[in-house]
Image: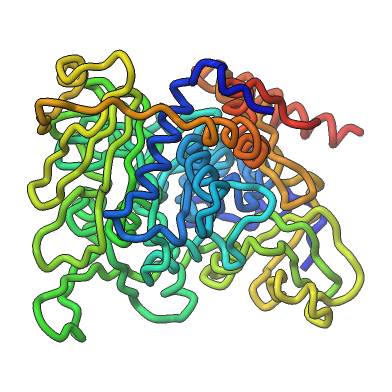
């Protein structure tokens, strides 16, 4: 079932990094996690955490069988409004150094240069969830910009504006950043293999903080790899057949 | 009221109407969208509840749409919605961006018959900055501090349009747990629904069916359209046709490609069915 001596895929390292952020003991507890559409790596990280034996409820919005909500999609937002969703994942066509997210498009509103699909629930979820893990695999100056063209959801809010949380971290194909809402800045936390502080600065359109020594992103453990290639893939294959085929060579049952 | 065809349903929607439709994962009536295209509808204002998918893209491409209010337009794994993107670039449609819970909240206000409802979040976003119809007020119940909060006006669509698995002889429809369709039906002036089949009996007298039903109070007309959600999925009856949507996304990259797709999949198919 598992082959621990097989090379670690970059996706597996990113999934394990996301799982460590979910379990971060310094962050508020993640008892109920929701994962939106088209998010195979965040979904895999949640399954990894659950299958490692942690007590966590997962609501995977685009799972066809076993949809968690019986009042339609508004139930997710109602739960979140009450503070009963602890952790959510968001991405963005553009993300800037203050953790502002642009899911609308570039150029003049509403995205007259390149239109992205749209903001979805971000303008609510980002405020109302105690923590959000930002994930965007493409790490380039066109995605990680100094200032987003349009704000779907702001990274920080003025004093007095009700807000439960914001970004905890930003995970990309090159590194892990931590977000510091007190100073509205990212700091570099971990480098994926082959990256340096300089290579990350080169690929990043915003300024960020970095200590002298940045630890490498840890490899997944053998136990994590065995779970990812076995039971996590089992859970994912219905919703994400192409991802499972590409990363784990698994085909969905006909 | 059971109508003889999906075209008869579409004929009830006048040009310029405000039409609420669910996205690809929650029972769109693609059959009604195609019937609107066949009848040459114009100036429709579409409300994506809370986002928009395949049906919205083909209606825009066919020139039926003046305005879209939605929280996103996407073909899922098949990527960006090509005709929506082209129409936005060309300035052919007005796009009013929202965020998912704002659309639900505006409909819930209409459901309750109140003029507005508040929603958290949004403050500091460019979504709010571009919505002069949304207002920020201090929370009148706040104990201390200003606590600004967004107020959203009630939104009553002219028509709710969706697909359900079943209708019964009493005019109720059944669609299981996809209750956002119930919210749309409750909030709209009229609901027009396509179904796979009509069955004898009354869902409201069956405890197991009642919770997944929408009562006939809200349903103005029903027509049978087998596989009427296709290429979107219908509950556990049939799945999302990803290959069909991916082929559409490729074809609709250009205006010519979209026109050829429309002729083949919407007009020629209906002519063939009429001749059969």
Residue at 26% x, 48% y: name it. Answer: A167
The quarter in which the N terminus of chain A is drawn is top right
Where is residue A69 shown, x and y percent of the image? 58, 63
- Residue at (44% x, 67% y) in the render: A79
Q: Nearer the viewer, residue B129 or B67?
A: B129
Give residue A107's position: percent from left, percent from top: 21, 30
Relative height, residue B93 to residue B2 (above, below) = above
Res B82 seen here: no
Q: Is residue B187 visible in the rendered structure shown here?
A: yes
Identify which residue, B125 or A129, lies in the foreground. A129
Is the image coloured rainbow, by chain, by secondary structure, or in one colour? rainbow
Residue A215 pos. (x, y %) = 24, 28
Which of the two residues, A10 or B1, is positioned nearer the viewer here? A10
Q: In the rendered image of this protein, does residue B268 appear above or below residue A87?
A: above
Residue A2 placement (x, y as % from top left): 64, 27
Task: Give residue A177's quadrant in the image.
Answer: top left
In the rendered view of the protein, which quadrant contains the C terminus of chain A? Answer: top right
The residue nearer to you, when weighing A210 against A83, is: A210
Q: Residue at x 32, y 58 (%)?
A: A124
Q: Is residue B59 above or below residue A113?
A: below
Note whether B96 is above or below B193 in the view shown: above
């Amino acid at each position: 079932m598992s082959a621990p001596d097989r090379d670690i895929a970059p996706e597996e390292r990113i999934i394990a990094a996301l799982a460590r952020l979910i379990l971060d003991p310094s962050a508020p507890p993640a008892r109920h996690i929701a994962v939106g559409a088209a998010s195979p790596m965040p979904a895999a990280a949640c399954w990894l955490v659950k299958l490692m034996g942690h007590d966590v409820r997962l609501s995977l919005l685009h799972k066809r069988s076993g949809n968690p909500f019986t009042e339609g999609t508004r139930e997710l937002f109602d739960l979140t409004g009450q503070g009963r969703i602890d952790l959510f994942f968001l991405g963005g066509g553009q993300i800037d150094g203050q953790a502002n997210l642009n899911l609308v498009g570039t150029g003049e509103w509403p995205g007259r240069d390149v239109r992205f699909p749209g903001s979805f629930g971000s303008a609510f979820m980002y405020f109302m969830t105690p923590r959000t893990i930002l994930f965007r695999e493409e790490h380039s100056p066109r995605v990680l910009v100094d200032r987003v063209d349009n704000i779907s959801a702001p990274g920080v809010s003025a004093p007095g504006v009700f807000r439960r949380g914001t970004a905890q971290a930003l995970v990309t194909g090159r590194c892990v950043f931590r977000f510091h809402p007190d100073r509205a800045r990212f700091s570099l936390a971990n480098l994926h293999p082959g990256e340096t502080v300089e290579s990350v600065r080169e690929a990043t359109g915003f300024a960020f903080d970095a200590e002298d020594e940045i630890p490498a992103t840890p490899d997944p453990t053998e136990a994590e790899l065995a779970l990812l290639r076995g039971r996590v893939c089992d859970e994912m294959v219905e919703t994400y057949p192409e991802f499972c085929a590409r990363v784990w060579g698994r085909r969905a049952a006909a | 009221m059971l109508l003889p065809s999906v075209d008869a349903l579409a004929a009830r929607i006048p040009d310029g109407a405000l039409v609420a439709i669910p996205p690809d994962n929650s029972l769109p009536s693609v059959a009604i969208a195609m019937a609107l295209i066949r009848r040459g509808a114009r100036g429709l204002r579409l409300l994506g509840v809370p986002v928009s998918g395949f049906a919205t893209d083909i209606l825009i491409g066919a020139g039926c749409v003046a305005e879209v209010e939605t929280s996103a337009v996407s073909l899922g794994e098949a990527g960006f919605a090509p005709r929506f993107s082209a129409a936005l670039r060309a300035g052919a449609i007005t796009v009013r961006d929202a965020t998912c819970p704002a659309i639900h909240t505006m409909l819930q206000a209409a459901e309750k018959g109140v003029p507005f409802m508040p929603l958290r979040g949004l403050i500091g976003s460019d979504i709010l900055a571009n919505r002069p119809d949304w207002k920020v007020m201090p929370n009148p119940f706040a104990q201390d501090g200003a606590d600004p909060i967004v107020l959203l006006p009630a939104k009553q669509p002219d028509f709710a349009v969706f697909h359900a698995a079943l209708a019964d002889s009493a005019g109720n429809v059944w669609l299981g747990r996809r209750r956002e369709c119930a919210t749309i039906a409750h909030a709209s002036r009229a609901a027009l629904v396509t179904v796979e089949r009509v069955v004898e009996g009354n869902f409201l007298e069956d405890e197991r069916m009642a919770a997944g039903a929408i009562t006939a109070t809200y349903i103005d007309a029903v027509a049978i359209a087998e596989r009427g959600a296709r290429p979107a999925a219908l509950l556990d009856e049939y799945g999302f046709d990803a290959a069909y949507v991916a082929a559409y996304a490729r074809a609709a990259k250009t205006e010519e490609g979209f026109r050829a797709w429309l002729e083949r999949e919407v007009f020629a198919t209906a002519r063939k069915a009429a001749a059969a």
